[in-house]
Structures are given as C-alpha cells and as structure tokens.
C-alpha cells in the first residue's frame, strides 16, 4: 500500500512539484504514518486522491 502511495506522489509531482516532493520525502519512510499525526496523515491521503481516507489510514497504521 505504501508503495502505491509513493507512485501516486511521484506521478503528481508534475502538478505541484514542491508539494508532492515533500509528500514523497515523507513516504520514503516505511513507518511514516506511525510517526506523523493523524491530521497530517489524512491530509497526505487526501492530497493523493485516496477515496476512503479513514479505511486506508487504519490499514497503514496496522502495518508493521
């Protein structure tokens, strides 16, 4: 799942390079969703166009 998010962020860099490079940097850490607060996590998922943000966030928090 994290790899899919990385690919989305990379593809979206053409739209807003600075924003999606920052997201890509955050996503480079496999455990990034365990280290960032929930608001930031939700914001990243929203920016990446994830439809079911809450369900996706929970999956990301459960992975170890």
Image (cartoon, rainbow, N blue to C red):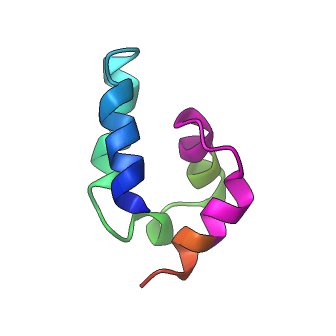
Asked whether 1 or 15 is in front, the reply is 1
Residue located at (33% from left, 22% from top): 18
Q: Which residue is located at x 47 percent, y 80 percent?
A: 63
Q: Residue 55 appears at what percent x and percent y? A: 70, 64
Single out the residue that lies furthest toward the bottom. 64
State the quadrant of the N terminus.
bottom left
Q: How many marks?
A: 0
x then y, percent, for residue 46:
62, 39
Q: Is residue 56 magenta?
A: yes
* Residue 8, image quadrant: top left
Q: Quadrant of residue 57?
A: bottom right
| Rendered-image quadrant of the C terminus | bottom left
Q: Position of 2 compared to 38: left or right? A: left
At horizontal 53% and vertical 69% (from top left) the residue drawn is 60
Does 24 appear above or below 62? Answer: above
Name the magenta segment's main secondary structure. Answer: helix
Q: Residue at x 40, y 64 (%)?
A: 32
Q: Is residue 42 positioned above or below 47 on the image?
A: below
Picture coordinates of residue 25, whole percent (x, y): 28, 45
Q: Residue furthest top?
A: 15
Q: Nearer the viewer, residue 10 or 35?
A: 10
Magenta part of the protein: which range? Answer: 43-58
Q: Picture quarter containing residue 58?
A: bottom right
Question: Would you place residue 59 above or below residue 39 in this image?
Answer: below
- The stretch drawn in magenta includes residue 34: no
């Amino acid at each position: 799942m994290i790899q899919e998010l990385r690919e989305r962020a990379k593809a979206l860099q053409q739209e807003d390079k600075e924003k999606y490079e920052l997201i890509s940097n955050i996503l480079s850490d496999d455990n990034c969703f365990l280290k960032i607060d929930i608001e930031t996590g939700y914001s990243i998922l929203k920016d990446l166009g994830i439809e079911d943000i809450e369900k996706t966030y929970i999956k990301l928090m459960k992975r170890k």
